[in-house]
Amino acid sequence: MNAPESATALPAIDKELKSLGLRLTPQRSHILAVLKAAERPISAYDIYSQLKSTFPHISIDTVYRNLTMFTTIGVALQINLQNSASALFEYQGERHHHHAVCIRCGKNVCVEACPGVPEVKYPQGEQGFHITGHAFELYGFCAECQQHGTYPARQRADRIRKDDD
Amino acid sequence: MNAPESATALPAIDKELKSLGLRLTPQRSHILAVLKAAERPISAYDIYSQLKSTFPHISIDTVYRNLTMFTTIGVALQINLQNSASALFEYQGERHHHHAVCIRCGKNVCVEACPGVPEVKYPQGEQGFHITGHAFELYGFCAECQQHGTYPARQRADRIRKDDD
DNA sequence: ATAAGTGCAAAGTCTTTGCATCATT
DNA sequence: AATGATGCAAAGACTTTGCACTTAT
């Protein structure tokens, strides 16, 4: 039905992992491949679902563990949107960007706008933050949802779906 | 031990709630009072804990329900920080500001810096977002944590603590 | 009187962790 | 061979929901 992770050549992925000083496992390579191939921030469960066909025995713990590690070393970026119950992850490539999120349907798109890190004025006695990153999200209504007026519930990952096995 | 919600006069709170067209209940008034009195974004459980002494029978469901409603109508702002497992809420007053968060100890402080809503360039076919708000968080190391090098686990709310009853 | 809010209990969902086994260096 | 990663199972934590009862308008 789909072969999403083959969009990126695995040898290149393996080389990248090695250069990061990480051990090479098939699961890790494929997780990073899926993450890189994604055009939007995706959840751990999204990755898990996509890999289920290739690795029937893969567990979501492994996906979480690798995503946490990728985030820690800066390979991935974790995004916590207000209307998404689960964290989303995105490969941190050279092009730095942010996201606009529809507060009605949950749809999110990448936007080029980046405010950078502005001049920061801390409260008194709090001079010392060493800023290493930032998050910036725009919330509003997408084109489709501007016709409707109501607010939706928080988006769930819908783990119950069983379209593959 | 403490009387945090009395920092703000309840009659004023009630007036505010009425002007919003909301029904008046003691729980709702006190929840909003605690939210307004807080100097930092706080979690639903923080509010629940503070009110436990005043309302021994208050339930956290009620806190969540009211916070969700406040957020929906724009009275409160919901913040989802990367290293906080629970959502934080903040009264949305006149002064608009954002937060710097320590990625090691979880400490967060308000900063005056606001990037505003910059010129947004959407991907092709996605012209129509009507932006109504934005989130901006700075991540880094606070003064104390700049001496240490390791990354911490995600901050939990620690519901097990039983310092009051 | 009617409509909405609350508390209780329970469930649902996302995420993490202990441990034995397996794979990579 | 030794260290690290994985899978399984279970637990932990945050949040939501159904329902009966109470409360505000």
Image (spheres, coloured by chain):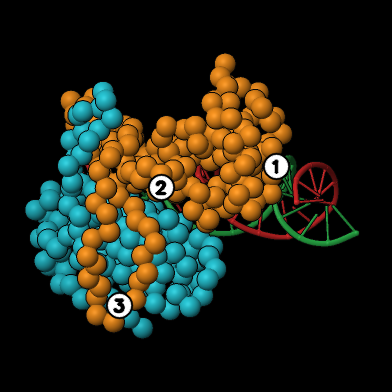
Chain colours: A orange, B cyan, C red, D green
Q: Label 2 sits on what residue type? A: Ile
Near-viewer residue (A7 or D5) = A7
Near-viewer residue (B152 or A110) = A110
- Residue at left 59%, top 36%? A12
Q: Considering the image in quadrants, where does the N terminus of chain B appear? A: bottom left
Label 3 sits on residue = A127
Give how far across and how far down residue A153 sits, in percent. Answer: 34, 38
Q: Specify few, some or many for label 3: CA neighbours under 10 Å numbering under 14, 14-19, or 20 or more.
A: few
Q: Which mark sits nearer the N-terminus, 3 or 2? A: 2
Is there a contact, CB below 8 Å, between mark 1 and mark 3? no
Q: Which mark sits nearer the N-terminus, 1 or 2? A: 1
Give how far across and how far down residue A44 sits, in percent. Answer: 53, 41
- Residue at left 39%, top 73%? B142
Q: Chain of mark 1?
A: A
Label 2 sits on residue = A79
Rendering quarter of residue B138: bottom left
Give how far across and how far down residue B59 sits, in percent. Answer: 39, 58
Rendering quarter of residue A141: top left
Which residue sits furthest top?
A1
Residue A132, above or below B145:
above
**Residue A88: in sight, yes or no?**
no
Q: Label 3 sits on what residue type? A: Gln
Rendering quarter of residue A51: top right
Near-viewer residue (A159 or A18) = A18
Is there a contact, CB below 8 Å, between mark 1 and mark 2? no
Q: Considering the image in quadrants, where does the C terminus of chain B appear? A: bottom left
Label 1 sits on residue = A25
- Residue at left 25%, top 43%? A113
**Mark 2: secondary structure:** strand
**Mark 1: secondary structure:** loop
Q: Label 1 sits on what residue type? A: Thr
